[in-house]
Amino acid sequence: MLVDTSRENAQDVLDALARQDCHPDDLEVVVYDMAGDGALPLRMPPGFHIHHLQRPWPQYWRVARARAARECSGDVIAFLEDHCSPDPGWATALLAAYRSHRWAAVGYTFHNGSRNSWWSRAALVADYGRFLHPQPGGSAPFLAGNNVSYARWFLEELGSAFEETIAVDYNWHQEITARGHSMTVASEATAAHRCYAGLATLCAANFQYVRVLGTARASAAQWNLFTRTARAAAAAILVPPLRLARLARDLWPRQHGFLEFLAALPVVWPVYTAAAFGEASGCLAGAGDAEERFVHWELNTPRIP
């Protein structure tokens, strides 16, 4: 878990880790702490192996995640945001999934960790609509970003590409498929995700995050200017309605799923549009300062408790 100034949120996640029902030897907690001197101290969960790494800001998101992952000694490396608290059976469900099959990555399912309101429900749909709990789980073509786990053997297989591609998990998920590996969603590996307080913040964070994704795609494929321009135009025009259609398809089987979709639409549409323009911007102009800005939105912006 990466941590900066949002200490109360981070402490909630650490307290949730302390309530895990797995054996203490099964869980190692790595906290990559980017807050400087004077930050409120964090209480580490008792009984587990703890690595509290104090590495003051500034840090790139991908660099910090890679360095934290390298501190892990286990066969499974699971990322949690500092505002995403795992339920007591989360670790046990992840371990069971990895023991059942040679998965390269296993994802979680999510429920609302903020106080119940139209806004918090809609924001959760915008961020994690495909992975809302309850759901049957099973094999998946991609998983949620930031809150996701990987098998160590896959990270070692990436080699030198490890740090460069860790900024956006979707890049890894594409690589898993390209290499012939598989992923799954562990339906009982549930976590409570807390949302931003407003739409402008949610849109800004999505814009910066997906701008990094667009940059990585263009760089990896070595697109020329014409291809970059065409891809940028396609992203801005086609991606929002395509994502909206997929969300409607994913929510449809859920009880009251269509009502969930309609209720969240005033939030989902602008968020998807902001993300699409972020991807287009990354294709055309590169990441710029998107990585620094995303760390600000991710680790230093208040969340609704």
Image (cartoon, grey):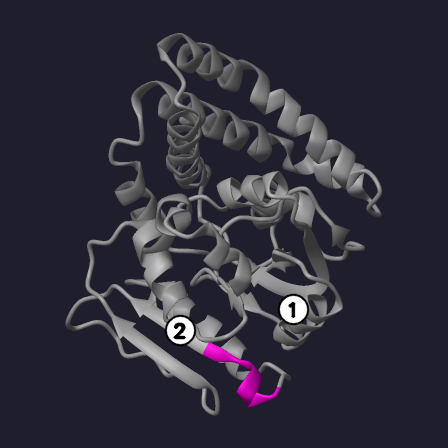
Q: What residue did someone put label 2 on? A: 30
Question: Mark 1 touching mark 2, by CB under 8 A?
Answer: no
Q: Residues within 10 Å of mark 1 (few under 14, many from 20)?
A: many
**Amino acid found under the numbered disc labelled 1:** Leu
Q: Which mark is residue 50?
A: none
Q: Where does the image place residue 10, in percent across and percent down from the top left?
A: 40, 69
Residue situated in front as seen by the camera: 34 or 65:
65
Give the amino acid at mark 2: Val
Q: Secondary structure at mark 2?
A: strand
Instruction: Measure the alpha-carbon separation of dots 1 and 2.
Output: 17 Å
User: Is 247 left or right of 165, judged from the image as shown?
Assistant: right
Residues 124 and 197: in front is 124
Q: Residue furthest top?
A: 226
Residue 135, quarter of picture: bottom right
Q: Is residue 203 above or below residue 137?
A: above
**Residue at x 52%, y 28% (from the top left corner):** 270
Q: Which region of the structure is painted magenta?
A: 23-28
- Sequence-first tag of 1 and 2: 2
Residue at 59% across, 46% down: 176
Asked whether residue 17 is drawn in magenta, I would say: no
Is residue 187 depicted above or below 170 in this figure? Answer: below
Residue 94 is labelled as 1
Quadrant where the N terminus sits is bottom left
Residue 155: x %, y % from top left: 48, 57
Residue drawn 42% across the image and 63% down it: 82
In-front residue for pair 242/103: 103
Residue 10 visible in the picture: yes
What kind of element bears circle 1? helix
Q: How many marks?
A: 2
